[in-house]
Amino acid sequence: MSNYGATNAAPTGARDQESQALLNNHQVNNTEANDTFYGRTFVHVHTHRKRYFALWLLAAVTAVSVVVGLYFYEHKHKHHTPPSGDEGKLVEGLLTSMRPPSVCESDRSYPIAILLSIFLGYVGVDRFYLGYVFSSLLKLATGGGFGIWYIVDIVLIILGTLPDHNGCRLVAP
C-alpha cells in the first residue's frame, strides 16, 4: 500500500531544521514556550527591548516635565494676600514698589502651551500656537530640530521665558 507520496524517512544527506540550525550556531525557537501568552509576550519584549526602553524614557521625561511645569506654574502664579489694616497698606505698598514694571499679557494660555509643547511640539504646533509661523514651519520640517529644539521649547515654556509673538507673557487661566 502506498501513502500517496508521503515518506517518513529523510533523504540521505539531508538534516532536519533543528539540527541544521544548531550546527550553524542559530538559536532554535522553543515552540512550547511560544505557545503560551507569557512566552509570546516575553519573546516580543525581548525582540523589541530598545523600543520599549525608548518609550519608557519618553514617558519619564514627559512626566518629569509636567511635574516641573506645574511646580513652577503654581509658585509663579501664587497670589499672596497682604495682611489687613495699616500694616496691610504698608506691606502692599512695599510689594507694589518691588514688582517689575507691568508686562503685557498674551491672550494665549500657559497650560495649553505646555501641553502642546509636550505632546505636539516635535511638529511645531506649540510655535504655531504662540504665533511664530516661520520657526514653526522650520521645526516641522526638521522634526523638532532633530529632537533638540523640541526639548528646548518644553523647558523654555515651563520656565516662562518664551513669550508669544508680540513679546507678551502667557497668562494663567
Image (cartoon, rainbow, N blue to C red):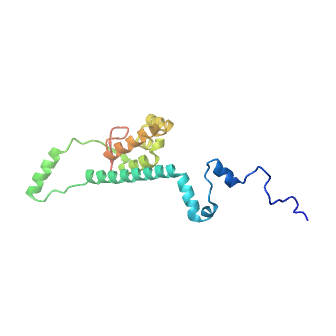
Q: Is residue 106 above or below residue 135?
A: below
Left or right: where does residue 54 sit relative to residue 64?
A: right
Q: Position of residue 120 (x, y in %)?
A: 46, 47
Left or right: where does residue 126 sit relative to residue 48?
A: left
Q: Residue furthest left?
A: 86
- Counting every numbered tag in the picture gives 0
In-front residue for pair 62/79: 62
Left or right: where does residue 15 sit relative to residue 96?
A: right
Name the residue at 60% across, 65% down.
36
- Which quarter of the rendered picture does the N terminus lie within? bottom right
In-front residue for pair 171/6: 6
Q: Is residue 159 above or below residue 9?
A: above
Q: Position of residue 94 (x, y in %)?
A: 12, 48
Name the residue at 55% across, 52% down.
47
Left or right: where does residue 52 sit relative to residue 97?
A: right
Name the residue at 53% across, 54% down.
46
Can I make out residue 173 in this image?
A: no
- Asked which quadrant contains residue 87, the reply is bottom left
Can I make out residue 54 in this image?
A: yes
In-front residue for pair 111/83: 111
Q: Is residue 28 above or below residue 37?
A: above
